[in-house]
Image (cartoon, rainbow, N blue to C red):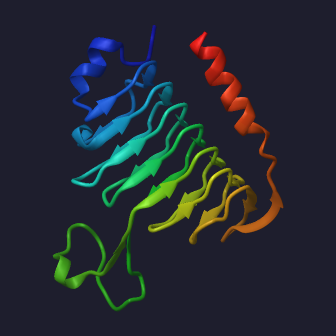
């Protein structure tokens, strides 16, 4: 049994735009798919949840979203080509203020709450390890790798290896994947 939507079922999802070779699990949940754009060669695994509002969720090509990922894209989310978000990750473009000065919850009128609402941008060749959390307004630059169980609260420079709560740079990442991606794309066109 195939657990991914076929071409006809993809059309019925109502996505804004999508490319070729898309695998979206029938157990994934896409809220407001009309605000979701997906490139080619993308796989979204089971129990992934993507929530969009009037701000776009843009998923590039050759991207993988692992099992049980949660992406709150209400304030804009973009992940560029050849990037991956591992199983269990949580991506938040909105977060309540928990200082005790405001109430929190979508059940409370906005005048009693205060939230941080900002777009998240994930550049090319980024890999986010399992069960990591990314908070609003973060930009993860090209080639950054984030270890499992990490908390990303600030922008990350490219080609670093990051790990921890909150993340700290622990190494430098090789750039060989750039040439590998070019070779892959060249071979794919043949």
**Where residue 158 appears, x then y in whole percent?**
68, 58
**Where residue 50 appears, x then y in whole percent?**
37, 44
**Where residue 172 appears, x then y in whole percent?**
82, 57
Q: Residue furthest bottom?
A: 101
Q: Residue at x 28, y 70 (%)?
A: 105
Q: Nearer the viewer, residue 89 or 83?
A: 83
Q: Residue at x 67, y 23 (%)?
A: 184
Q: Which of the 4 quarters of the picture holds residue 66?
A: top right
**Where residue 100 appears, x then y in whole percent?**
38, 89
Q: Nearer the viewer, residue 178 or 48?
A: 178
In this rendering, position of residue 14 left or right of residue 176: left
In the displayed structure, 58 sits above or below 13; it is: below
Q: Nearer the viewer, residue 184 or 122?
A: 184
Q: Residue at x 58, y 68 (%)?
A: 155
In this rendering, position of residue 122 left or right of residue 98: right
In the displayed structure, 5 sits above or below 140; it is: above
In this rendering, position of residue 119 left or right of residue 108: right
Q: Residue at x 61, y 9 (%)?
A: 190
């Amino acid at each position: 049994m195939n657990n991914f939507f076929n071409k006809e079922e993809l059309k019925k999802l109502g996505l804004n735009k999508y490319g070729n070779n898309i695998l979206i699990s029938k157990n994934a949940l896409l809220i407001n798919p009309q605000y979701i754009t997906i490139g080619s060669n993308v796989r979204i695994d089971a129990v992934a949840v993507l929530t969009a509002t009037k701000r776009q969720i843009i998923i590039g090509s050759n991207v993988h979203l692992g099992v049980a990922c949660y992406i709150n894209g209400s304030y804009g989310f973009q992940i560029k080509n050849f990037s991956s978000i591992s199983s269990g990750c949580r991506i938040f473009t909105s977060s309540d203020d928990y200082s005790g000065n405001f109430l929190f919850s979508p059940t409370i009128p906005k005048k009693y709450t205060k939230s941080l609402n900002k777009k998240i941008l994930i550049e090319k060749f980024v890999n986010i390890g399992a069960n990591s959390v990314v908070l609003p307004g973060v930009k993860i630059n090209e080639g950054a790798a984030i270890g499992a169980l990490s908390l990303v609260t600030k922008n990350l420079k490219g080609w670093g290896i990051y790990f921890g709560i909150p993340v700290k740079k622990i190494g430098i990442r090789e750039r060989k994947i750039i040439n590998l991606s070019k070779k892959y794309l060249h071979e794919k066109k043949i």
